[in-house]
Amino acid sequence: MFKGRGQEELETGGNVVSRGSELKLMNNEEIHKKLNPHPLAFYSLYLIWIYVIILTMIFMMYGNKISSVLGNPLIYPIETMKSVTNMLSKSFIIGLPFVGNVVSSISRIAIEASFLYKTYSIISLWIFALLISSIVISFSRISWKWIFILLGIGIVSFSLSLYLKLRQPGVYYIAIILSVLGIIGVEIYRRNHTFYITNFRIITELGFLEYKLNSLEYDKINNLILEQSLIGRIFNFGTLIPITASGIGMGEDEASVTFGIGGKPQKGPFMGGAITGTRGIQVPRTRSEYALYGISKPREIYNLLSELIHENVEAPYLREISRDIKELKDKKSG
């Protein structure tokens, strides 16, 4: 058996207790390894929160210069709202039922937003920077939740500072505190991943917020993929993704190109059209709770799993041969 960083040997046989739940083993099942992700396995999540801290500190120190150079794009929707309400207030529709109240409410919101913008223009630019960053991160990670998380950091920090009547730097301090809590949350998430390698199957367990337990027997595995990033190769950790015939462990990378053209003839309405082409390829990809994610010494574990998969692939044939021999013996003795 192997023994490395982030993993430990267990006594074989019987049951093993894990995080308040009892992991039931099958008859004659033995645990070869208990693994946890390497401390740097989720470094990309740590980097997101570190980025938020750095961005916040940059605005804290150089917000005035950034605002004077870049301006603030949030002023445009506010000014547009004010212009629209002024135009509507001078038109005949203001006398229609309920329209006057709606226009008055929109105008009041625009005035309050304009006041907040002038008072907290640098804060609004910082929130806009968080929004743009969250969109980029969501695209790269294929997860839209980061838009809500990072934008929520900005809105919650700003709202708390208003509620607590703090000065503008208070917004940044609250955001930094929330980001540090985010880093702690990632570490708790990492520690709640546990992987078991037995002589029959791979068991993955995640106990963060909700509990997930997954079991995959070796005879269901068609292929085993080892992935290591540059950081993983330097610090000797990586991810093992088991691929099954049903497609577990596979995802898809897709690229699309759109070409459009439009115009207005001399006499006639505007006309346009578009052509879209898409290509996709199947790639190994799965969530951290369904793979041996970020484990230490992945090549050693890869070799161990390859042997176990090979043994379990041969086992059904050996059992069939054994059954045939037994039937022949029974016939001869009969």
Image (spheres, rainbow, N blue to C red):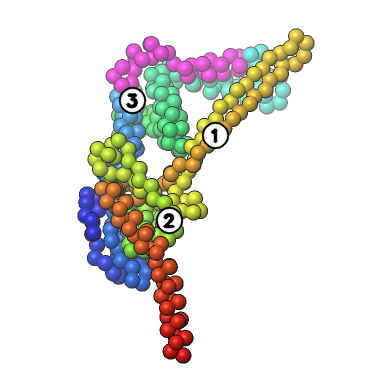
Mark 3 against mark 1, which lies toward the viewer? Answer: 1
Q: Earlier in the sequence, mark 3 or mark 1?
A: 3
- Say what secondary structure mark 2 lies in: strand
Front disc: 2 or 3: 2
Task: Return the residue at label 2.
Answer: 221
Quarter of the image for residue 304 reads bottom left
Calculate the distance from the C-alpha at mark 2 to the C-alpha at mark 1. Answer: 27 Å
Residue at the farthest front position: 332
Measured as percent of width and height from the top left, residue 271 is found at: 71, 18
Residue 279 marker: 1
SS label for mark 3: helix
Let me know if residue 82 is in the magenta part: yes
For residue 74, above or below residue 30: above
**Residue at position x 33%, y 63% in the image:** 199
Label 2 and label 3: CA atoms lie apart by 44 Å
Residue depicted at x 68% and y 20%: 272
Residues in magenta, as a range = 58-86
As drawn, the label of residue 112 is: none
Residue under circle 3? 55
Q: Nearer the viewer, residue 121 or 44?
A: 44
Sequence order check: which comes first, mark 2 or mark 1? 2
Q: Amino acid at mark 2?
A: Ile
Residue 164 image point, x, y percent: 35, 31
x 43%, y 44%: residue = 284
